Image (tube, rainbow, N blue to C red):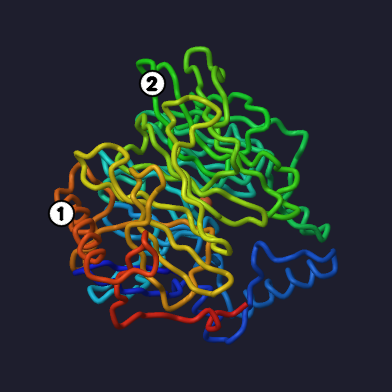
């Protein structure tokens, strides 16, 4: 389900809609689920075989055609690529989404970026170059090639595949990093072995004997001949925050979250410890020259000013993850400190409140890197009330400058995106080239100031937008298990 808030003319419109994936539509029409989730429990050989046999029978009888239409739920992330908005899940192709002028969400359909050859899945974390408009993406598979890298041009068309034959088995690769010249992949200890299903066990497992490594390939490479790998023990990347080149292009720096307790992560996600790390790689020596955590806190779902994607940046903003797995605070990190404690500001949510990953909205392209807003959804488990928060990213306390009380629950722990909408067109984070972005962000600030002055506040630090009517929604009860 996508949750969206539109802020316009001093009012907010809230919308929750399921992405109308093929799986959703088929199961909605039938009234029950017919294809097992990849995360479904595996209860032994007999149950696994029964589940597999039932799925095959349903495909053979024409109830379901996952090979042609995919099985994804498009509920991992959202991305703006070449002016269009996509809902993504890594088990399927992206689904194009459109936001209507009255604030509703429409699913346009599954999209393959006009690929000449069919392909069936794509990472939920493509990387968009804010200068060129290109997007870089990959997919992993359980048969060779286990990893495939590809580019989507600024015209929205997918380029040729670059199979990575130096990947010798399937690793669970959720994210990667891209700089001006390179793409960086993590081949970690979380692996996928479909044969495990035949043994009645989950296909995902941890291989403790494997040494994690990073693979570096030129981002315009046509094959993987010049790709090289370096061992990075104990580094199992979940999300890349940013990466860039420095020392006149002789070094790469990657900032990413590392699942530091990977052996426990598959037993229960709430056991996962996530540490943000900075890793510097010498391209000449082909080795890691600096590696350190940037905070002792458990942090993930980090973002930066999107204008700095692939370039050296100073500030990052992350969710602090507590046990059980939930975002209880948002922190600001100053990476220029190059220390084990780069946290320079934080906001702890109220007791019982958990949030999503924050997103950074710059004030305007010419502003300082951290001049802008942090936005996030927060849910109060006790009152069952959700809010949309706008925080001042430049404030030492990440002060809440505006908030919207929402009519429905927004689940926490997910990714988000801020976009400008103009009629039916979507203007995305191409901040340097889109003069209208400046107008929008300035208007957002103006509206926040206006609302702060007009609306009575329930706490000194919060001002509430009025919620415009209608507030679109599809309740969670409408979804099938
Ligand atoms: Fe993710």
In the rendered image, the quadrant that contains the C terminus is bottom right
The x and y percentages for residue 11 are 25, 72
**Which residue is depicted at the point 49% across and 17% down?**
282
293 up-or-down from 404: above or below = above
Q: Would you say the residues marked 1 and 2 are in contact, meaning their CB atoms lie under 8 Å apart?
A: no
**Which residue is depicted at the point 50% across and 23% down?**
280
In this rendering, the count of numbered labels is 2
Marks 1/2: CA distance?
33 Å
413 up-or-down from 101: above or below = above
Q: Earlier in the sequence, mark 1 or mark 2?
A: 2
- The residue where tag 1 is placed is 439
Judge the density around disc 2: few (<14), some (14-19), many (≥20) Cα neighbours within 10 Å.
some
The x and y percentages for residue 455 are 27, 71
Give SS at disc 2: strand
**Which residue is depicted at the point 55% across and 55% down?**
327
The x and y percentages for residue 8 are 22, 68
Q: Quadrant of residue 404?
A: bottom left
Q: Quadrant of residue 310?
A: top left
165 up-or-down from 79: above or below = above
In the image, is 355 to the left or to the right of 99? Answer: right
The x and y percentages for residue 373 are 32, 51
- The residue where tag 2 is placed is 246
Give SS at disc 1: helix
Furthest residue in direction top, as rendered:
285
């Amino acid at each position: 389900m996508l949750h969206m808030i539109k802020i316009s003319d001093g009012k907010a419109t809230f919308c929750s809609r399921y992405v109308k994936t093929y799986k959703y539509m088929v199961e909605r029409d039938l009234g029950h689920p017919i294809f097992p989730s990849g995360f479904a429990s595996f209860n032994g050989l007999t149950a696994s075989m029964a589940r597999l046999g039932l799925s095959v029978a349903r495909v053979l009888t024409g109830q379901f055609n996952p090979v042609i239409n995919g099985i994804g739920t498009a509920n991992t992330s959202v991305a703006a690529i070449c002016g269009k908005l996509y809902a993504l899940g890594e088990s399927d192709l992206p689904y194009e989404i459109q936001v209507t002028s009255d604030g509703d969400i429409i699913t346009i359909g599954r999209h393959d970026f006009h690929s000449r050859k069919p392909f069936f899945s794509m990472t939920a974390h493509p990387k968009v170059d804010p200068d060129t408009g290109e997007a870089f993406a990959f997919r992993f598979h359980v048969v060779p090639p286990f990893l495939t890298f590809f580019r989507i041009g600024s015209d929205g068309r997918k380029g040729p595949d670059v199979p990575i034959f130096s990947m010798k088995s399937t690793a669970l690769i959720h994210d990667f990093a891209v700089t001006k010249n390179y793409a960086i992949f993590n081949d970690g200890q979380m692996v996928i072995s479909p044969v495990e299903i035949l043994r009645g066990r989950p296909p995902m497992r941890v291989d403790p004997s494997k040494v994690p490594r990073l693979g570096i390939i030129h981002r315009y490479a046509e094959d993987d001949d010049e790709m090289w790998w370096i061992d990075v023990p104990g580094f199992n990347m979940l999300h890349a925050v940013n990466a860039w080149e420095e020392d006149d292009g002789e070094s790469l720096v990657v900032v990413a979250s590392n699942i530091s307790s990977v052996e426990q992560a598959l037993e229960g996600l709430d056991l996962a410890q996530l540490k943000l790390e900075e890793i510097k790689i010498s391209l000449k020596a082909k080795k890691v020259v600096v590696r350190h955590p940037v905070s002792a806190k458990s942090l993930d779902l980090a973002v930066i000013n999107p204008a700095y994607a692939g370039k050296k940046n100073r500030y990052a903003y992350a969710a602090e993850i507590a046990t059980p797995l939930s975002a209880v605070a948002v922190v600001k990190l100053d990476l220029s400190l190059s220390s084990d404690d780069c946290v320079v500001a934080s906001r702890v949510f109220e007791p019982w409140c958990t949030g999503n990953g924050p997103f950074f909205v710059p004030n305007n392209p010419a502003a300082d890197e951290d001049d802008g807003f942090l936005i996030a959804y927060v849910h109060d488990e006790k009152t069952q009330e959700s809010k949309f928060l706008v925080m001042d990213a430049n404030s030492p306390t990440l002060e809440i400058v505006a908030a919207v009380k929402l009519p429905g629950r927004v689940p926490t722990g997910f990714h988000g995106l801020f976009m400008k909408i103009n009629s039916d067109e979507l203007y995305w984070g191409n901040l340097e080239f889109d003069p209208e972005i400046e107008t929008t962000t300035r208007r957002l600030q103006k509206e926040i100031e206006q609302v702060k002055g007009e609306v009575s506040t329930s706490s000194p630090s919060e001002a509430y937008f009025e919620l415009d009517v209608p507030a679109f929604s599809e309740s969670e009860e409408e979804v099938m298990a």
